[in-house]
Image (tube, coloured by chain):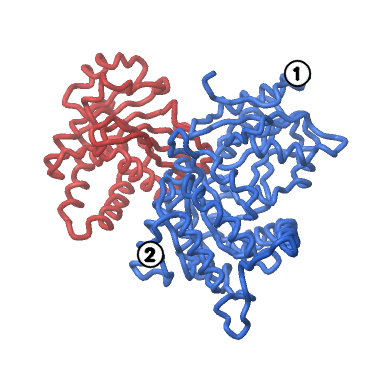
Chain colours: A red, B blue
Amino acid sequence: MAKLTEIRWHGRGGQGAKTAALLFGEAALSEGKYIQAFPEYGPERTGAPVQSFNRISEEPITIHCHVRNPNVVVVLDPTLIGAVDVTAGLTPGGVIIINTQQSVAEMKKKLGADGHRVYTLDASTIAKETIGRDIPNTPMLGALVKVTGLLSYDTVMEDTRKKLEKKFRNRPEVIEGNLKAIERAYNEVKGVE
Amino acid sequence: MAKVLDKAAEAAQERGAVKTALTGNEAVAQAMRQINPDVVAAYPITPQTEIVQIYSSFVADGLVNTEFVAVESEHSAMSASIGASAAGARAMTATSSQGLALMWEMLYIAAGLRLPIVMPVTNRALSAPINIHCDHSDTMGARDAGWIHIFSENSQEAYDNTIQAIRIAEHPDVLLPVMVTTDGFIISHAMEVVEVEDDERVRKFVGAYKPDRYLLDVDHPITMGGLDFTDYYFEHRRSLAEPIFGANKRIVEIGEEFGREFGRRYGLFEEYRMDDAEYATIILGSTAGTAKVAVDELREQGVKAGMIKVRVFRPFPHEEIAGAIAGCKVVAVMDRSDGLSGRGGPVFGEVRSSICDREKKPVTVGYVYGLGGRDINVEMIESVYRDMQEIAATGKRALVSYLGVRE
């Protein structure tokens, strides 16, 4: 893995693109890595395309500009494909993980993603079945962990549990649902050789 | 490198520091929690809002015993801070942009009354047009108000500087208000790794506030803010120059003491690979971090590149910076605000004034960049170094350029 990994999350306002970046960043910190997690601040509103970003490194990160050439792109909403140029700036050999019911082959064709590694996950169905709502960010976190191998699965599960326990003290079903979603995503993401 | 980091990590663990993922605003709020001032009077404004919001939750949760005054404007926030400080309390507030602009007349009063108020400012552009993103126009406009200005590169520095600012402001030789700035959104809303130090250690470092003179000291009545016409006004304003002149000595002492206590030493500015540098940039805030990456890449290509990150902008370390750049061929001064002076931004003016009487001095050029949050990346900074090499080769230069603007 390169010294510095840059990740771009695409979502729609309300889907948790920012939260996913924060969760992933915090999980990376608990493995002793240096991290950045930040959203793009524009005129956001529910349903509008939004982006958020991570930087992950073994060494302190001093760079503070936008992420223009991510190594990894995560797409939380299938309807963004075609509406937003999700592969813009993606490095050669870079990874793109898409929440969709379509196959990897179909997605490759749609994106024309030559030279990129494409992975798919039906995160919305997993989210509905585990969390009870179409909030695809935690399942996509599971897929990201599996595909990139940047963080250990156990660390992410443990750290996410801690975070959720703080936020949802009185709603254990939310915590369990989210953890189940990560577990299923980790096992169900397609395209992994 | 790894060994050095391990050693630092061990030392951090020993003193009870916890590596935490925090945004700049969260880091500042944590510093304020540990400082636990007597009074915080503040009004929310993007991108500073979270500082006030988080701090008010600390108050509500009983984590601090601060009197939190939810005022109706920034003018009142500064007025209430002045009142509290004059009464003898340790007072803090925080603001951004238009909020700082609304404090204007009160900023001068805080300094003129020698009140050690500490104010984190999350740098944001000024209207018009309306913009919520980062540039330094807001605090640069307040550069002659008699406040000390300390800039932060990242969340860690925002945290460290806020803690040190209390000591600087309250030092008996200084007794001036201090603003600690962080770049709006770029730092204020970006989560990074911050070492949060042990509460007790920070409290010990900050110490108790024991003002010499204050209004509620009824046994020693004083007047503050009296009328001063042609008879004494000049003398009082003249006396304001002394603590400003002397402050840098104290800032360095406190920065060194902070380094001994917490492992991160601070001076007036940071020199990055300046030892044999022929080409240097002078930068404030988060862009300095991005410039470090550019300098490293240029060094690998054999370019003798260096960078100076100004931490203390007021009082400006004229002699020290002039000395640090004396051996350079060309120096590019990067301003994240446009002074509209016809001669580039305010930092450019300061640097030029620092070197103008020196016999040996570099060629200087000014760049105005990043207004309203316009991104500045490694390639753009590298282009500035290429410009400098070109200037050295040809002797031709544009005195002031605008970097990253569509013309």
Q: Tell me what residue is drawn at x 24 percent, y 36 percent.
A: A46
Residue A5: x and y, percent?
A: 44, 34
- Residue B45 x/y as whole percent: 41, 49
Residue occupied by mark 2: B58
Number of on-image labels? 2
**Is there any visible trace of residue B17 in the rendered image?**
no
Chain bearing mark 2: B
Residue type highlighted by circle 1: Lys
* Point 14% across, 43% down: residue: A130
Q: Residue at x 41, y 22 (%)?
A: A89
Question: Seen from this angle, which residue lies furthest front?
Answer: B230
Pointer 1 chain: B
Q: Tell whether B395 sits left or right of B21.
A: right
Instruction: Give whichever of A177, B308 is nearer the camera.
Output: B308
Local crowd at mark 2 within 10 Å, few (<14), some, or many (≥20)? some
* B377 w.r.t. A158: above or below: above
The quarter of the picture where residue B72 lies is bottom left
Kindly indicate the quadrant of the structure image that contains residue A45.
top left
Task: Work out whether B254 lies above or below B158.
Answer: below
The quadrant in which the C terminus of chain B is found is top right
Dot 2 amino acid type: Phe
- Give the residue number, with chain letter if any, for mark 1: B396
Q: Is residue B320 shown left or right of residue A172?
A: right
Disc 1, SS: loop
Are circles 2 and 1 on residues that touch, CB within 8 Å? no
Q: Establish if B95 lies above or below B128.
A: below
Whether residue B373 is situated above or below residue B384 in the rendered picture: below
Q: Nearer the viewer, residue A7 or B216?
A: B216
What is the distance, in whole Å, between disc 2 and disc 1 at their CAs? 57 Å
